[in-house]
Image (spheres, rainbow, N blue to C red):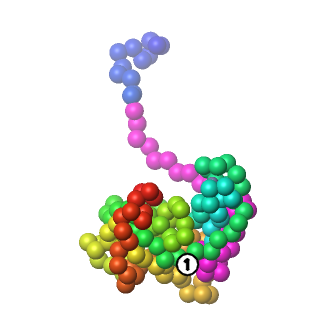
Amino acid sequence: MSDALQGIEPVKSITTPVRLEYQFTAGRASTRFLHGMAEGKILGQRCPSCAKVYVPPRGSCPRCAVPTEQEVEVSGKGTVTTFCIVRIPSENLAIKPPFVAAHILLDGADIPFFALIHDCPFDQVRMGMRVEPVWVEKAQLAPTFESIRYFRPLDEPDAPYESYKEHL
Ligand SMILES: [Zn+2]
């Protein structure tokens, strides 16, 4: 330690804002998924080995380490597996809290899909609730997740816990 710092308490931590900007290269599987969103379709891919359907697809099965090339369209109807009510604002969010963010197991898919829940009082959102997507107007469809505005409740009985307990 130099003489100038002798007797001075060392700084152990500071708080400083961090900002990251990055570009996402979609790749083949995500490109197909995003073009599907622009057509009002939700496209996944099925693993040829274990038959699991990934939505959105990443182009391979992480369990089997094989490419997933068979395209599967799912309806968009699904089941809320888990959710949370977000009450903390963030400058990176276009939406103002409070809002409900949920994992939704789409019918025919094997991994949950992350989305917002609206058209429902917060205290009525629950695990097992059946939901459907609300798309933007047809002219506004684009290759982005934002083509789905949010999910809303379906007038259907809740899915039994056994039907989604492996997807929590
Ligand atoms: Zn697999």
From this view, report whether residue 17 is shown above or below residue 131.
above
Residue at the image position 70 percent from the left and 51 percent from the top: 66
Q: Is residue 19 above or below residue 152?
A: above
Q: Give the total number of marks visible in the rendering.
A: 1
Instruction: Please tell me which residue lies in front, 111 or 91.
Output: 111
Judge whether residue 29 is colored magenta.
yes
Q: Secondary structure at mark 1?
A: loop
Within the displayed image, which quadrant is ligand 1 positioned in?
Answer: bottom right
Task: List x then y, in percent, for residue 5.
Answer: 42, 17
Q: Is residue 63 left or right of residue 167?
A: right
- Kindly indicate the quadrant of the structure image that contains residue 146: bottom right
Taking the view exactly as shown, the residue that stands out farthest to the left is 123
User: Which residue appears at 53% of the width and 82% of the height?
Assistant: 135
Residue 118 screen position, x and y as percent: 38, 77
Along the line of sight, which residue is nearer the eye, 41 or 130?
Answer: 130
Where is residue 130 shown, x and y percent of the image? 40, 75
**Which residue is located at x 46 percent, y 73 percent?**
78
Q: Is residue 57 left or right of residue 10?
A: right
| Tag 1 residue | 75
- Amino acid on which disc 1 is placed: Ser
**Can the viewer see residue 102 in this picture?**
no
Label 1, residues with CA under 10 Å away: few <14, some 14-19, many ≥20: some
Q: Quadrant of the C terminus?
A: bottom left
Mark 1 vs ligand 1: CB below 8 Å: no
Residue 42 can be seen, yes or no: yes
Give yes or no for residue 104 being in the magenta stretch: no
Q: Residue at x 45, y 58 (%)?
A: 167
Q: Which residues are magenta?
A: 13-42
